[in-house]
Image (cartoon, grey):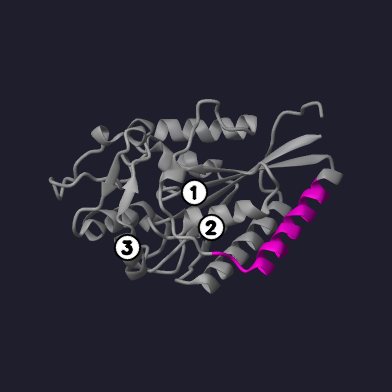
Amino acid sequence: MRRRVVIIGIGGASCSGKTLLAKHIRSVLPPGSTIVHQDDFVPPIDQVPYSDRYPDLQDWDDPPTCVIWPDFRACLKHVRRKGVLPDHHSSHDHLNKQVEIPLDPQAVDRFRIEFQRFNAEMNAEGTELVWFLVDGFVLYWDREVIDQMDVRILLKVPHDLLKQRREERQVYVLQNPDDAAGGGVWVDPPNYFDKIVYPAYVKAHDGLFDGGVETETLKREWEDRLFISSPSDGAEEMVKCFTECCEEIIRQCREGAGAFLLPYKS
């Protein structure tokens, strides 16, 4: 039996719903499927730089510095080579409060069956699928990280809705293990979304689009490399987003997305 690792990237701005979507998709994948959260690779608070434009504000979102890129790359490369997370990896995602939007049970049942059927087809051909989802707010910034993704999904949510969600949330448990262990939290200063968060999102994603992130047209080099879902608010929109993303994952996997590990004895 050969093992084939499939790494599904789910990117998007802060509060776009990417972590919630990743968890919904994991719920219909086979047991043992894993989520890697880019937030687990942010630097400790004493290493977060201050904004050049707003010197009184720490900038948690600037793409070059908001993630410890060597560690994040190394984790994904380990997943690609071994089909498991590194032994030392741990996640603090559970510490953050997240808005729960339940899915229609019929949609859940439909795709649980779809993925079971696809896994059975692959098993019949002598292939075991190993599923990983990676969610991140700057997932498509670093070329080495991009290259590790077999399926690339971007949640494109309007500015005003992102701002509303961010301002409703505001309080974040610090994700770095040292900070989180000490009970540290981050509270957005006034106007942090407009000054720091959204400009950083634009900086990280403008290069994907002809005319920038406010347009709908991907650059030609991204047309076949990035699937965009544009959910707004509410349970129906989450079901729509979940449905089209699951359909896209299955479509790309049927076309061969993923990479085989070295053969092993079953």
Residue 169: image quadrant is: bottom left
Residue at the location (41% across, 37% down)? 41
What's the CA distance linking mark 2 and mark 3?
19 Å
Callout 3 amino acid: Glu
- Tell me if residue 64 comes above or below residue 250 in the rendering: above
Left or right: 126 as drawn, with respect to 13: right
Mark carried by residue 135: 1
Q: Nearer the viewer, mark 2 or mark 3?
A: 3
Numbered circles on residues, count: 3
Residue at the location (29% across, 62% down)? 167
- Binning the other alpha carbons within 10 Å of mark 2 as few (below 14), some (14 to 19) or many (20 upward) gives many
Name the residue at the right extreme. 124
- The residue where tag 2 is placed is 21
Circle nearer the N terminus (1, 2): 2
Marks 1 and 2 in Cβ contact (< 8 Å): yes
Residue 202: % across, % down: 33, 57
The rendered magenta stretch, by its main secondary structure, is classed as helix
Residue at the location (56% across, 64% down)? 102
**In the rendered structure, which segment of residues is drawn in magenta?**
102-122
Q: Could you tell me if residue 225 is visible in this image?
A: no
Q: Nearer the viewer, mark 1 or mark 2?
A: 2
What's the CA distance linking mark 1 and mark 2?
9 Å
Q: Is disc 2 placed on a helix, strand or loop?
A: helix
Circle nearer the N terminus (3, 1): 1
